[in-house]
Image: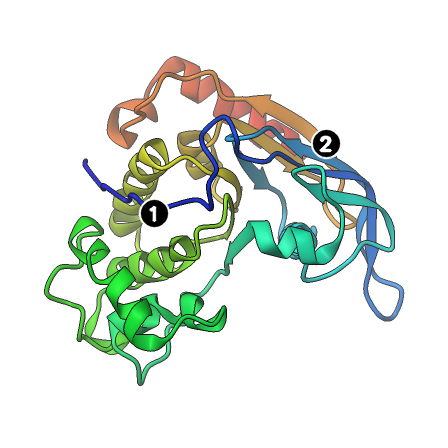
Amino acid sequence: MNTGLEVPVEGTTRQGLPGLAAENVTRRFSGGVVALDHLDLRAAPGEVLAVVGPSGCGKSTLLSLLAGLAEPHSGLVSVGGLTPATERLDRCALMPQRDLLLPWRSALDNAGLALESVGVSRPEARRRARPLFERFGLAAFERARPSELSGGMRQRVAFLRTLLVGRPVLLLDEPFGALDTITRGEMQEWLADALAEEPRTVVLVTHDVEEALLLADRVAVLSSRPGRVVAEIAVNLERPRPRRTTVTDDAFIDLRARALGALER
């Protein structure tokens, strides 16, 4: 599949993408609930790192910390070696679980919303977003409202909105969790192709072990709350990884068993 993203990444190249790290990180909520406890996690520049774990183990909290939307109570979080929240925020684009498209805006204006939020005018945001609609499989839907789009199309608009700001780090929080099985599989392959053409450093949070193994270079397994890394699994499978043939491969089945075993423990 030729996605042809061609979205600039603020002057970085594949080799120039930043890595990120959470070092001995603890994060608590009000009432004394500990979400993350002495968590250590790293992603190399240009790596796709998937994070899996039980519900409530702090996966979304981890993304908020990496994105600079929150700070740890102890430990360090860095992106490209930089620890201030403003620096992390400048380098990260966060795609939340829900697409959060505004129902009164067209698909084109929803895609340009992130650009508008950093001071780009609406006409200029439209100009930048419009050429990408065909490449994202959204041609002729520029004027459609979210209610007129399928679930997969809505997710593509949300992903386009995330990419348009040109940040070198993508933080994806269950991006396909609300989709049906067939659409989810299609979107997984689409995302894999998109990232192959336009590399980013990626942290993908998912509850789907197969999705993690299909998309990631490495999978980190978190414990139940408070979240700690209990296993890291290198996914040494050749790309591309078409779902239909990959999930029946013996090496994939072995990796899935290892990941599920770590989750059960």
Q: At x 50% / y 61%, what residue is drawn?
A: 96
Residue 143, position as x, y percentages in the image: 17, 75
Q: Name the image quarter holding residue 251.
A: top left
Q: Is residue 12 left or right of residue 158?
A: right
The residue closer to the viewer here, 17 or 139, is 17
Q: Name the image quarter holding residue 147.
A: bottom left
- Which numbered tag is attached to residue 230? 2
The residue closer to the viewer here, 252 or 49, is 49
Q: Furthest-bottom residue in view? A: 104
Secondary structure state at the residue bearing disc 2:
strand
Q: Is residue 167 left or right of residue 99?
A: right
| Callout 1 amino acid | Val
Residue 119, position as x, y percentages in the image: 47, 72
User: Which quarter of the rendered picture does the C terminus lie within?
Assistant: top right
Tag 1 and tag 2, C-beta contact below 8 Å = no
The residue closer to the viewer here, 251 or 107, is 107
| Callout 2 amino acid | Val
Q: Is residue 215 above or below residue 83?
A: above
User: Which quarter of the rendered picture does the N terminus lie within?
Assistant: top left
- Which numbered tag is attached to residue 7? 1
- The label nearer to you, 1 versus 2, is 1
Disc 2 packing (10 Å; few <14; some 14–19; many ≥20): some
